[in-house]
Image (cartoon, grey):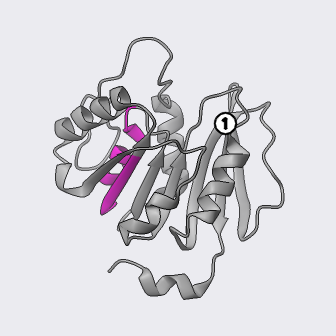
Amino acid sequence: MRIIAGQCKGRKLISLPGMHTRPTSGRVRESIFSILSSEVPNRHVLDLFAGTGAMGLEALSRGAVSACFTDNTQKNLSLIRENIRRCRQEKHCRLFCRDILKNLYFLQAQKELFDLVFIDPPYQQQMAGKVLENLMHSHALAPDATIVLEHSRTEKIPENIPDMKMKDQRRYGKSLVSFFTYKGSEDSSENSPG
């Protein structure tokens, strides 16, 4: 697994053996970033269920200014930390070990609003709706933020998420990638970085 494009292009990333982390395939990752294209530079990225950190690191390679990686195991965070080191992106990254299904309130303390979010929860566990709900309650999204959710085709995604609209959905084998736009309050932009 390697970074596909940008300043870190070709850097090799490590992953855990087996299917525990199930990193997004290179083909799907390339397609996602092709769709996002101009939405990546200068963005503040949140990578939930980060696994190997490949999505956040790909975004940094393509011009994002920061990335916050969140996973629920120290083993995965150690893996992400090593991949960050390999890409020489330490000064642009923060890592958190949290139960994403419990809540995301800890993000409020980061004094940063995220405008690009990647979510890749374990398949077949019907987590997507709860994670989107927790993200909405976190008050950590910038107006017009883009949320990219990778999920199983069999997982039902809530249709009426307040302030969030699905703008695109693509199928890749047994996976779907859903793209949402967050239409939050302009008041939250007062806390926006930069």
Q: Position of residue 121 (x, y in %)?
A: 59, 36
Q: Is residue 155 above or below residue 110?
A: above
- SS at mark 1? strand
Instruction: Tell me which residue sits at (73%, 64%) in the image.
Output: 165
75 inside magenta stretch: no
Residue identified by numbered label 1: 151
Q: Position of residue 92 (x, y in %)?
A: 24, 57
Q: Position of residue 70 (x, y in %)?
A: 42, 45
> In the visual, does 166 lie left or right of 181?
right
Q: Is residue 168 above or below residue 73?
A: below
Classify residue 62 by image quadrant: bottom left
Amino acid at pointer 1: His
Count the marks: 1
Classify residue 187 by image quadrant: bottom right
Instruction: Tell me which residue sits at (37%, 53%) in the image.
Output: 68
Q: Nearer the viewer, residue 171 or 64?
A: 64
> In the visual, does 73 lie left or right of 134?
left
Q: Is residue 135 above or below residue 176?
A: below
Q: Position of residue 137 (x, y in %)?
A: 62, 64
Q: Nearer the viewer, residue 111 or 36?
A: 111
On-image quarter of the N terminus: top left
Q: Which residues are magenta?
A: 52-69
For the question of whether residue 38 can be seen, the reply is: no
> In the visual, does 175 lie left or right of 53?
right
66 inside magenta stretch: yes
On-image quarter of the C terminus: bottom left
Q: Residues within 10 Å of mark 1 (few under 14, many from 20)?
A: many
Q: Farthest residue in the top direction?
A: 18
Q: Nearer the viewer, residue 9 or 145?
A: 145
For the question of whether residue 162 can be seen, the reply is: yes
